[in-house]
Image: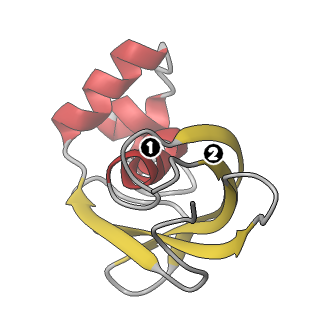
Amino acid sequence: MTAAFKVGDQANITKTFTVEDVNHYASLSEDFNPIHINKEAAEASIFGAQVVHGMLVASLISGLLGNHLPGSGSIYLGQDLAFKAPLYIGDEVTAIVEVIDIREDKPIAKLRTYVVNRKGVVVVDGVAIVKYVLM
């Protein structure tokens, strides 16, 4: 049995986060930092406007791993993340995963994971390790 994908394969998803998305995430995560949920406070911050929670942005990676590459049945084993730039509410982003290594001894893969804004700026960068279902 082998993986149904190979090193170099990619998948992506594009999304625009709304104020409602951010407020819902704040409620779920208990992260009510004013830079996310208070327009006036965010405008007075170093960002100059409301920013999307970094972990909310990174959550797109989870969706890609579980639904697209490696796909259904994948189990997230680990994730390194670096938050490189702010994502402002209303900005479109594309999350991308790319297979960079497949272990030969176990059904485990390493994927580069990153999210770019519409200007091509990387806002989240990292590496994921997943266990995948053999085909």
Q: Secondary structure beneath disc 1?
A: helix
Viewport quadrant of the N terminus: bottom right
> How far is the residue under mark 1 from the one under mark 2?
18 Å
- Residue that numbered label 2 is attached to: 131
Color scheme of the displayed model: secondary structure
Residue that lies at the very extreme toward the right in this rendered image: 105
Q: What residue is at 44 percent from the left and 43 percent from the top?
A: 59
How far from the left and from the top, in percent, is residue 99?
Answer: 59, 73
Q: Where, by quadrant of the figure, is residue 113 drawn?
A: bottom right
- Residue that numbered label 1 is attached to: 59
Q: What residue is at 32 percent from the left and 49 percent from the top?
A: 67
Q: What residue is at 60 percent from the left and 39 percent from the top?
A: 76
Q: How many labels does the image show?
A: 2
Q: Secondary structure beneath disc 2?
A: strand
Looking at the rendered structure, the kind of residue marked 2 is Lys
Looking at the rendered structure, the kind of residue marked 1 is Ser
Q: Which of 106 and 10 is in front in this view?
A: 106
Q: How crowded is mark 2: few (under 14 residues within 10 Å), some or many (20 or more)?
A: some
Viewport quadrant of the C terminus: bottom left
Q: How crowded is mark 1: few (under 14 residues within 10 Å), some or many (20 or more)?
A: few
Q: What residue is at 35 percent from the left and 31 percent from the top?
A: 38
Q: In this picture, is 12 found above or below 88? A: below
Q: In this picture, is 71 found above or below 126? A: above
How far from the left and from the top, in percent, is residue 2?
Answer: 57, 65
